[in-house]
Amino acid sequence: MIYKSYLVEKNLNLLNTSLCLFFGENLGLKNDFKNKIKAENTKKEIVNLNQEEILNNSEFFFNDINNISLFEKKKIYFLNNTNDKILDLILEIQRKISDQKIYLFSEILDKRSKLRNHFENSDTCGTVACYADNEITIKKLTLEKLKGFSGLSAQNINLIVNNSNNDRIKLNNEIVKITTFFQDKKITTDKLESLLDIRLNDDFNILKDVALIGNKVETNKLLGDTIIESEKNIFYINIINQRLYKLLELFKISDSKNFENFISKIKPPIFWKDKPHFIEQAKKWNSKKIKFVLEKTYSLELSIKTNATINKDILIKKLLVDICDLANA
């Protein structure tokens, strides 16, 4: 049985099955679902388990599920990092559980996944796809989470949305900072910029822009002046990718170099102050070059996530130099 994530977000009670699978790349959305389940089941015990420990001791897991005591709290199970390997166990559990609730959480599962297919086609199981957020959903979440705050101008909303980089986890962290800082619920732009550390992000955006334009002099100067924070390397890659995808979108709707007439058709729209840079970049790039760079950013992100010993700052700077060179190729 398939449930739409946006409907379940509004009403968790739609999940009326004992077994439910949440899958997809949106870790922030999956965490939000976990928090909603906990919030609506405060009198029940939440049991967090990983697939590996369950498979290594399935007998203990079966006993724990079947050992229902009148003197203990009812339990809800979160099974994390699940994939097709757990399907046989789920089929066995499905025949035995009654009042228990079991929620599985997985990474991306393609349409060939046996686990996904079982949950989608079963009348007694539910599945919720947690796909990546976009600017529209992030903006909507921002408005929902800051309901009751004054000062939510279009400029301030864009500051928050752009700073989150379409990452729900990043957005949730920023919302916590905002609600803690603005206890009077009156948001001002200058204090918001300071709180979100907009200056450092703007510095990298300037560096990204001149590299994509192909300005070697400015790129070299800014590479020496801009602070590259190690913990933000994936964030930097996402900023670059965002602009590349926007350029690809422009090329799909424009068949000439007269880009000014087509920029307004891009949704969500390009921020007004970014338009001059965006037009300059569009004149230097084409779809083939952009796809080449996207392959490089994908490989770099994979290396950063899997190799703790590499010098991440140097690799980000090399990526920007390569982008600058390719813009002029």
Image (spheres, rainbow, N blue to C red):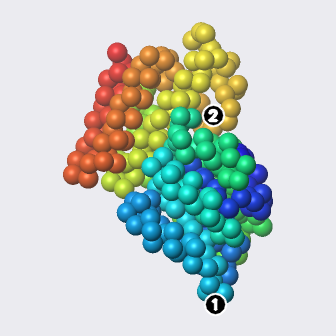
Quadrant in the picture for the C terminus: top left
Seen in the image, is 58 located left or right of residue 300?
Answer: right
Q: Which residue is mark 1?
A: 71
Q: CA distance from mark 1 to mark 2?
A: 59 Å
Q: Callout 2: helix, strand or loop?
A: loop
Q: Which residue is mark 2?
A: 270
Res. 112 in view: yes
Query: In terms of image quadrants, where is residue 171?
Result: bottom right
Seen in the image, is 48 located left or right of residue 179?
Answer: left
Q: Compare residues 61 and 150 and report the one nearer the observer.
A: 61
Crowding at mark 2 (Cα within 10 Å: few <14, some 14-19, many 20+): some
Seen in the image, is 286 located left or right of residue 45?
Answer: left
The picture places residue 75, in percent across and down from the top left corner, at 61, 75
Figure check: 188 above or below 320: below
Crowding at mark 1 (Cα within 10 Å: few <14, some 14-19, many 20+): few
Mark closest to the chain's N terminus, 1 or 2: 1
The picture places residue 304, in percent across and down from the top left corner, at 32, 46
The picture places residue 189, in percent across and down from the top left corner, at 63, 59
Mark 2 residue type: Ile
Q: Callout 1: helix, strand or loop?
A: loop
| Residue at (26% x, 53% y) in the render | 308
The picture places residue 37, in percent across and down from the top left corner, at 66, 67
| Residue at (68% x, 18% y) in the render | 261
Q: Compare residues 271 and 32 and report the one nearer the observer.
A: 32
**Which disc number belongs to residue 239?**
none
Q: Compare residues 312 and 178 and report the one nearer the observer.
A: 312
